[in-house]
Amino acid sequence: MVAPAGPGPAAPAVRLVLVEDNAQLAASIAEGLLDDGYVVDVIGTAAGGIERGLRRDLDLMILDLGLPDRDGTEVLRELRAAAVHVPVLVLTARDAVDSRVAALDAGADDYLVKPFAFAELVARIGALTRRASGPRWVTTTELPLVMRDDLVVEAGDKTVALSPREYALLACLVRRRGEVVTRSEILREAFGYDFDPGTNVIDVHLTHLRKKLVGFPVAIETVRGAGIRLVVSA
C-alpha cells in the first residue's frame, strides 16, 4: 500500500518593505501584516528605501511620501530609473488629485490615503502581489508583437521595457485584442481589483504605455463612453 503523499512545500512568504517614518504607525501596520503571514521590513528614510529597493529581492514596497530626508516621489523616480520594477503602493496623507497624479506618474502602482482601513490595505497588497507574481507571458498570435517574461516588449528591431502595471495593462488588451475593454474589466483583469480604487490609475498608466509604444505596430484606441482596445496599426 502506497502511503498518501504529504502536503506540498509551503508557498514562499511575500516579502514587503514598509518605508514609513512614523514609528508608531509603522509598527502597527507591520504587526498586522505579520499576523497575515507577510514578511515585513520597516525603513524610516527615503535613502534606506532606495537602498533596499535596489537589492531587487522584494515582492512589494509600501511607501510614504512625507519622508524626513527626501520626498517619496524621488524614491519612486530613482528606483524606476534604475529599472527596479517592484510594485509600489503609496500610503500617504496627501489626498489632493495632483499628488496622486504625481506619484502615479513617478512610477507608483497604487495610491492609498491615510487614514485608511487596514482591510483595504491588505486587499490592495493582495491585488498587486497577485498581479506581479502571475504569468507575465501572453500569447501574441496574429499580432506583430512579442511580450517577454522580463517585462520587455519586442517588435522587429524595436524593444521597450515596461513597468509591471504597464505590462499587465498591455497583456489584458492583447488577450482581448480587437475588443473594447471597459474600465471595470481593466481594473479586474489587469490590476486585480474588484472595486474602483478611486484614482486615475488607468489613465496614468495608459498615457505612459502609449508613449512607450510609439513606433510599434500596434495602437491603443479610446472608444468614447465604452473603453479601450488594441488594434494593429496600418
Image (tube, grey):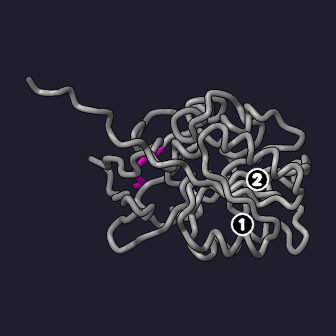
Element class at badge 1: helix
Q: Residues within 10 Å of mark 2 (few under 14, many from 20)?
A: many
**Amino acid tagged 1:** Leu
Pointers 2 and 1 in contact (CB under 8 A)? yes
Q: Splitting the image into 4 quarters, where does residue 210 fall?
A: bottom right
Frontmost residue, 96 versus 156: 96
Q: Does the magenta stretch include residue 73?
A: no
Element class at badge 2: strand
Which quadrant of the figure contains the C terminus?
bottom left
Decide if residue 70 is on the left or right side of residue 180: right
Q: Is residue 108 visible in the rendered structure shown here?
A: no
Q: Residue at point 72% right, 54% down?
A: 62
Q: Residue at point 78% right, 45% down?
A: 29
Residue 183 image point, x, y percent: 62, 33
Decide if residue 121 is on the left or right side of residue 125: right
Of callouts 2 and 1, the N-terminal one: 1
Q: Residues within 10 Å of mark 1 (few under 14, many from 20)?
A: many
- Residue at numbered disc 2: 90
Q: Splitting the image into 4 quarters, where does residue 225 fall?
A: top right
- Residue at numbered disc 1: 76
Report the magenta residues as a range: 230-234
